[in-house]
Amino acid sequence: MNADSVPLHPQPKPLWSIHLWAVTAAFGTYFCMYMYRKPFTAASFSEDGGQDWDQKAVLVSAQVIGYLISKIIGIRVVSEVRQDQRAWLLLTLILLAHVSLLLFAIAPAPWHIVCLFLNGLPLGIVFGLVLGFLEGRRMTEALTAGLCASFILAGGVSKTVGQTVLEFTQRSWQWTVPQSERWMPFLAGCLFLIPIACFIWMLSRIPPPNEQDESARSKREPMTSEDRKRIVRTYAGGLAALSLMYLLVTILRSLRDDFAPEILAGLGATVKPSAYATIDFWVALIAMVANGSSVFIANNRRALQASLGVCCLGFAVTLAAVLLQWTSPVSPEGMMIMVGAGLYLPYVAVHTTLFERIIALTRDRANVGFLMYMADALGYCGYVALMLGKNFFFKSSEKAGNIVSWFLTSCAIASAICLILIVIAMVRFSRFGSTETEPTL
């Protein structure tokens, strides 16, 4: 071979191919992670032990408590971890979660409840590690919208996977209901071990943000303890308003996801395994397009204001869905799509745009993972409190009807409160970044 024909330097990859690779890797990793967290919610666990208390609510609570503790730990871990450490840490966390599902299958009651607590403990850090590969880029909103679409879609698909595994084990292997419900989460996770390993490898190959990215969005570096304290002191008012909004949305979004079968049944639907994935496909599409579009707004201040406007739109849609159900009900599937879209518009906005553009606007030394995990920790504190008190609200024979009524009323009240909180956040952040120049896309 002629030496002159060999290029001295490798040609840089086009940005579109890097972005496509990154969003595929992030989507795939977090989508697969949900298959270690959510399939068990497709089961009722009503026949496992015959307890008077709502066993499913206790199991969900145990997992969410572990998830909450993980979020609190993640405030430090995610903000400090280096890029070269993320992939191996991700793989370790997934394997620990899968082992806990094996223990859930074989442990005697009530120790199986502890196993779901151990399952939630490593999984809460996964999102922040994946997000770290995407933030600080001119295309961050579009990339993160793809990441967020993964957990919206995966919420429904994981229930479909769980219910399909249940039906297969009961029909083909002649397992009893309690036996199939215990083993189903572990078996569902087995199906995704190779895919998630491949997606984590893809994440590890994503190049860091370039100079143009850092100029438009600011450089993202690991934070110190003093950095975290300074951010909280400086932006306390605005961050508090956004965190309280996120708390309410997290509670309602988690309630909708974890008890979708009960809510749909209470609305009068006959649920098929494919129904969850179909509903959440439309929710994901709406939330992804609405929030990902902010990538076309180069000015960080205007992008932040537009994202707060998307949040307002989401709460208006939620209120409209509740009013429709109270006056002239739509189909159960249509109601779940409307409420899901209304809740996920602000929920995804926090993940994709709000914290990303706040850092870009203020140019402070910070990263999205830190702000995201502060809000997440508060949000899951609220959801844990809700789950622990659930048995006082819903009795077994009336559970479906009660949960629908209580869920819709909570959506209406929380949406009104959140609209006020968004106005407060707008006012608090309006005084930062007033001298910002117009960046280029």
Image (cartoon, rainbow, N blue to C red):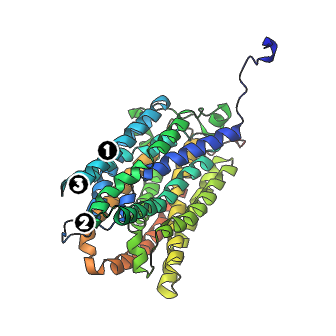
Task: Name the foreground residue: 230 vs 31.
Answer: 31
Foreground mark, 2 or 1? 1
Q: Amino acid at mark 3?
A: His
Q: Residue at x 51, y 85 (%)?
A: 329
Residue 437: x and y, percent? 69, 41
Residue 196: x and y, percent? 48, 43
Q: Amino acid at mark 1?
A: Val
User: How far apart are the alpha carbons under marks 3 and 1?
Assistant: 13 Å
Please tell me the numbered disc located at residue 351.
none
Q: Secondary structure at mark 1?
A: helix
**Residue pointed to by mark 1:** 99
Q: Residue at x 51, y 32 (%)?
A: 221
**Residue pointed to by mark 2:** 55
Residue 114: x and y, percent? 23, 52
Q: Secondary structure at mark 3?
A: helix
Q: Residue at x 65, y 38 (%)?
A: 18
Tell me if I can see residue 26 in this picture: yes
Q: Amino acid at mark 2?
A: Gln
Q: Earlier in the sequence, mark 3 or mark 1?
A: 1
**Residue pointed to by mark 3:** 112
- Mark 2 in CB contact with mark 1 (< 8 angstroms): no
Q: Secondary structure at mark 2?
A: helix
Residue 70: x and y, percent? 34, 46
Q: Residues within 10 Å of mark 2 (few under 14, many from 20)?
A: some
